């Protein structure tokens, strides 16, 4: 069942966070739905502009509608990740997306508000939720690369003003994470005090944490032992997910970790079976491993076992 992120956040707020997982292909879709059904968790399925362009946006739509039929107990939002204004309108008007992110965080404050406001108006008229972003994370997302010296943590007073004026339903904040597999050069520093300060100014408002992959070191070692060359990769401590959720973070974005599972499975499979060229064999292993990975993240996010209650709340 496709629902909005707003509906999911109403149930999750202050208790747990929804895992927000990016998908690009059929194997990821299968693994994601299996993992969430296995762990009885509601979730957010995210589609980036890169994913929409990888094959054709209509393929993704077809696969997700099929998954909704194959897994009729699932409850999830279909969310555009890091959208620009034009892509947001395309998704809103498609009637398929239940949630969009307008990421105008690299524009000056007033322009970010103006763009977000326009998207909110169009989205709300169509029953679609809107996530906006204030502050700048590091790393690479879509075609934009943010250097370390351009990273700006979110300022709580500005965030409160932004939320009130832009009318968005949730806000992605920069609290020290970055996109990709190379997150911290020194020790991990997550600025939970920013979340706390925003919550004091805007109590009950759902916040979003991007760049939340944990980049498991064991995964990196296995990838490298199977021919990979990934050096200096580091991620977020996943034990921080639940404390963040208790402070009002309702959505935690995880993409890179899924790519690492894919890379590890395929590198190991073809190393260990040099005679094989049937890609469905490692594909089958990946679906299983990705489902297990998703279930393990849902456990850490606290969303495990929430599906029944969410369904009841949505039907009442
Ligand atoms: O924040 C970006 C997401 O990880 C999506 O990445 O644009 O390469 O699909 P992508
Ligand atoms: P990671 O690169 O840490 O997985 O972050 C993904 C993300 O924020 C997608 O919007
Ligand atoms: Zn992101």
Image (cartoon, grey):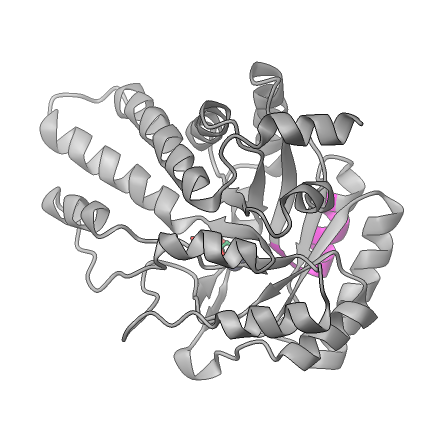
Q: Residue at x 48, y 81 (%)?
A: 150
- Up the image or down, 170 lies above or below 271; here it is below
**Viewer-proximal residue among 4 and 96:** 4
Could you tell me if residue 108 is visible in this image? no
Where's residue 227, x and y in %? 13, 45
**In the rendered image, which quarter is residue 179 located in?**
bottom left
Q: Residue at x 27, y 75 (%)?
A: 186
Could you tell me if residue 6 is visible in this image? yes
Q: Tell me: 286 left or right of 310.
A: left
Q: Quadrant of the C terminus?
A: top right
Q: Residue at x 36, y 59 (%)?
A: 236
**In the rendered image, which quarter is residue 155 located in?**
bottom right
**Viewer-proximal residue among 290 and 312:** 312
Where's residue 157, x and y in %? 69, 81
**Residue stretch rendered in magenta on the structure:** 82-91
Where's residue 14, x and y in %? 61, 52
Where's residue 76, x and y in %? 62, 34
**Viewer-proximal residue among 175 and 82:** 175
Q: Residue at x 76, y 65 (%)?
A: 116
- Up the image or down, 197 lies above or below 230; here it is below
**Viewer-proximal residue among 266 and 120:** 120
Does 135 appear in magenta? no
Q: Tell me: 258 left or right of 274.
A: right
Q: Tell me: 209 left or right of 234.
A: right
């Amino acid at each position: 069942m496709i629902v909005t992120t707003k509906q999911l956040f109403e149930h999750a707020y202050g208790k747990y966070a929804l895992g927000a997982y990016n998908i690009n292909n059929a194997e990821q879709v299968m693994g994601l739905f299996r993992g969430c059904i296995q762990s009885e968790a509601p979730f957010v399925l995210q589609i980036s502009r890169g994913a929409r362009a990888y094959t054709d946006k209509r393929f993704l739509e077809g696969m997700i509608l099929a998954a909704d039929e194959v897994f009729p107990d699932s409850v999830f939002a279909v969310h555009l990740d890091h959208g620009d204004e034009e892509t947001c309108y395309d998704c809103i008007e498609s009637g398929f997306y239940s949630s969009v992110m307008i990421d105008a965080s690299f524009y000056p404050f007033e322009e970010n508000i103006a763009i977000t406001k326009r998207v909110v108006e169009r989205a709300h008229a169509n029953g679609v939720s809107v996530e906006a972003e204030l502050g700048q994370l590091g790393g690479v997302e879509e075609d934009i690369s943010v250097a370390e010296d351009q990273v700006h943590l979110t300022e709580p007073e500005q965030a409160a003003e932004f939320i009130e004026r832009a009318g968005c339903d949730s806000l992605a904040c920069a609290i020290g994470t970055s996109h990709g597999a190379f997150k911290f050069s020194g020790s991990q520093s997550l600025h939970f005090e920013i979340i706390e300060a925003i919550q004091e100014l805007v109590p009950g408002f759902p916040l979003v944490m991007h760049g939340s992959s944990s980049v498991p070191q064991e995964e990196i070692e296995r990838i490298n032992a199977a021919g990979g060359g990934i050096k200096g990769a580091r991620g977020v401590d996943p034990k921080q997910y639940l404390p963040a959720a208790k402070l009002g973070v309702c959505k935690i974005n995880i993409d890179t970790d899924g790519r690492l599972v894919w890379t590890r499975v395929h590198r190991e499979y073809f190393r260990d079976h040099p005679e094989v060229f049937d890609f469905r064999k490692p594909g089958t292993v990946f679906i299983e491993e990705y489902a297990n990975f998703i279930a393990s993240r849902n456990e850490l996010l606290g969303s495990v076992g929430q599906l029944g209650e969410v369904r009841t709340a949505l039907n009442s």
